[in-house]
Amino acid sequence: MADTAAQPSEEEFRTEALEFLEANARPRPPEKLVFGEGSDEVSVLPERTPDEDAREVAEAKDWAARVFDAGFGWITGPAEYGGRGLPGSYQRLYSALEAKYDTPSQAPRMIGLGMIAPTILAHGTEVAKRAYLRRLWRGDIIACQLFSEPSNGSDLAGVQTRAVRDGDEWVLNGQKVWTSGAQYSDIGEILCRSDPDLPKHKGLSAFLVDMNAPGVEVRPLRQMTGGASFNEVFFTDVRVPADHLLGDVNGGWTVALTTLMNERAAIGGGGAAAGGGATRRLLDLMVHLGATADPLLRQAYADLWIHLQVARWNNERALSKIRAGQLPGPELSIAKLSLTENMRRTAELAAQVLGPRITADSGEWGTYAWSRYLLGVPGMRVAGGTDEVMRNIVAERVLGLPKDAPPRA
């Protein structure tokens, strides 16, 4: 708990934050979307070249270090690990202020801060907490998540990557897939099978692994959009210190649930859940092509807009629980499903409006650009737990419905 005697008032904090932002960034210009002007890119995931990745990572790290050194990097974190120990209201205040300024994207750090850092804080050894938390929040290092495997997908209990104890180290062998940001990450949270003789959920252990260690190989995966936002990662006799174990030996399922809860909060509660700029782009496209004169297309857009508002309210419900110090319930699984369903609605309506233009590049601004969005949506239906897994969670754990009968041999 923070020392309230030394804690600034929110007004003092606001003044301090504004002084920093005004000295280090320019006010963000009003967002102005005009059909036919600027870039017409519409995509689900950013798809960059290695040089573009390196440039974005460098800019993100530089800004993170300046923010952290000024006292705004980890506002709510424990002081002993580099945080400032202030209430969540101070973080919300700073985030609202920074949003008004033009600052470098922090997208390369979001997995590390949104999923890995909270897991280290909850389950890491004292050595791991002191080694990584401050550096993650300052932007000195970047982290990725290493859960999914080629043969098991979202069935994390079926993980086959092996971890074998060897003295004061663990030796890892196996393969992970669909790992975002692995190409520029310094550490990763990996889920492994540490005891093959125990039931599936009970024989798992989680570790922090050095992504630059001997035996770690990262290979990009080419998507049908043409980009390579994800990777497959191979581990061959990779050695991990015993003090990099997260949680207990064979207690990796509990650790994974902590990470997944934070992942679904990040994915489902993000700006994309409310439609982002794609919905406005779609409306502008409909006006430009005269599609708003079609009552069926107008109705489809209205249906999309309604679903987006409901998703926003659901996310607010989850955020309200978090702000009140409660654990969110089914809202996060529903949020993730709402996100991908609304993306599907958006993509399908764009395809209806554009017709052949979405598959044949005529050179017309703002038309063929939607093809990348259309092709990117299936990837989001897999990320953070497939839609099918989310539906099972809601059906079984929220609605209390019986599990499906197992397939017959």
Image: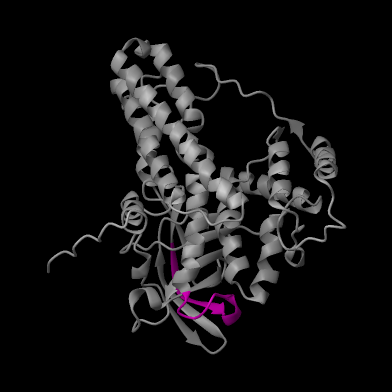
In the rendered image, residue 245 lying in the magenta stretch gets the answer: yes
Q: Quadrant of residue 143?
A: bottom right
Please provide percent x and percent y for residue 291. 35, 13
In the rendered image, residue 174 lying in the magenta stretch gets the answer: no
In screen coordinates, is 265 left or right of 200?
right
In screen coordinates, is 131 left or right of 392?
right
The colour scheme used to paint the residues is one colour
Q: Is residue 366 above or below residue 59?
A: above
* Residue 372 vs residue 189, the one in the foreground: 189
One can see residue 226 in this view: no
Please provide percent x and percent y for residue 377. 37, 40
* Residue 325 vs residue 290, the one in the foreground: 325
Q: Residue at x 61, y 61 (%)?
A: 117
In screen coordinates, is 396 left or right of 205?
left
Q: Residue at x 76, y 31 (%)?
A: 26
Q: Quadrant of residue 199?
A: bottom left
* Residue 257 vs residue 365, the one in the foreground: 257
Residue reaching furthest bottom? 167
Quadrant of the image containing the N terminus: bottom right
Quadrant of the image containing the C terminus: bottom left
Please provide percent x and percent y for residue 240. 55, 77
One can see residue 203 in this view: yes
Q: Which segment is the magenta one?
A: 233-251
* Residue 370 vs residue 199, the one in the foreground: 199
Please provide percent x and percent y for residue 348. 32, 30
Residue reaching furthest left? 409
Q: Is residue 102 above or below residue 94?
A: above
Q: Residue at x 63, y 45 (%)?
A: 106
Q: Is residue 357 above or below residue 258?
A: above
Give the mark count: 0
